[in-house]
Image: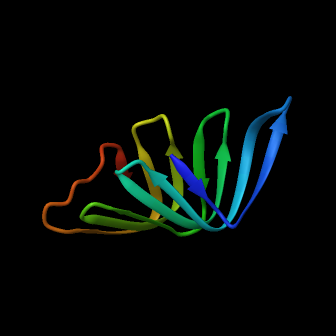
């Protein structure tokens, strides 16, 4: 997972990252699987989970999702958008294992 943002506030505990607050034009790239874009997100390093209350756009090979209230455990199997979900699938879409829409 590669993460890009206009700004980040990193919170350390004993010299180790325990939380990051990301702001502005956030791009999270998950290998060759999909890209996630949003304007505000948090990362809990202990739980290894990204969360975002703002609108999130997810684009992959033949599919796209928009929604709010994201939970994405980077070592887990399920990325969840809990609210305001809109999705589009093109012919031949390859939805990555672990994207869940509620």
Q: What percent of the width, then of the height, locates residue 39?
A: 62, 69
Relative to 69, is 17 on the left or the right?
right
Q: Is residue 6 above or below residue 43?
A: below
Q: What percent of the width, then of the height, locates residue 88?
A: 27, 70
Q: How is the image coloured?
A: rainbow
Residue at position x 37%, y 66% from top?
A: 65
Relative to 53, is 96 on the left or the right?
left
Q: What percent of the width, then of the height, locates residue 74?
A: 50, 40
Q: What percent of the width, then of the height, locates residue 101?
A: 36, 55
Q: Is residue 59 above or below residue 102?
A: below
Q: Is residue 67 above or below residue 76?
A: below
Residue at position x 43%, y 59% from top?
A: 35
Q: Quadrant of residue 78?
A: top left
Of 68 and 59, nearer the camera is 59
Of 19 and 51, nearer the camera is 19
Q: Residue furthest right?
A: 14
Residue 102: in sight, yes or no? no
Residue at position x 28%, y 64% from top?
A: 63
Residue 4: in sight, yes or no? yes
Q: On the rendered image, what quadrant is the C terminus found in?
A: bottom left
Residue at position x 14%, y 61% from top?
A: 92
């Amino acid at each position: 997972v590669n993460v890009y943002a206009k700004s980040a506030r990193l919170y350390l505990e004993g010299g180790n990252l325990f939380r990051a607050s990301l702001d502005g034009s956030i791009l999270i790239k998950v290998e060759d699987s999909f890209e996630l874009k949003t304007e505000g997100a948090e990362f809990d390093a202990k739980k290894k989970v990204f969360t975002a209350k703002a609108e999130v756009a997810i684009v992959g090979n033949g599919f796209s999702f928009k929604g709010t209230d994201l939970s994405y455990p980077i070592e887990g199997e399920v990325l969840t958008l809990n609210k305001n979900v809109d999705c589009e699938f093109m012919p031949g879409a390859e939805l990555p294992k672990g994207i869940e829409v509620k």
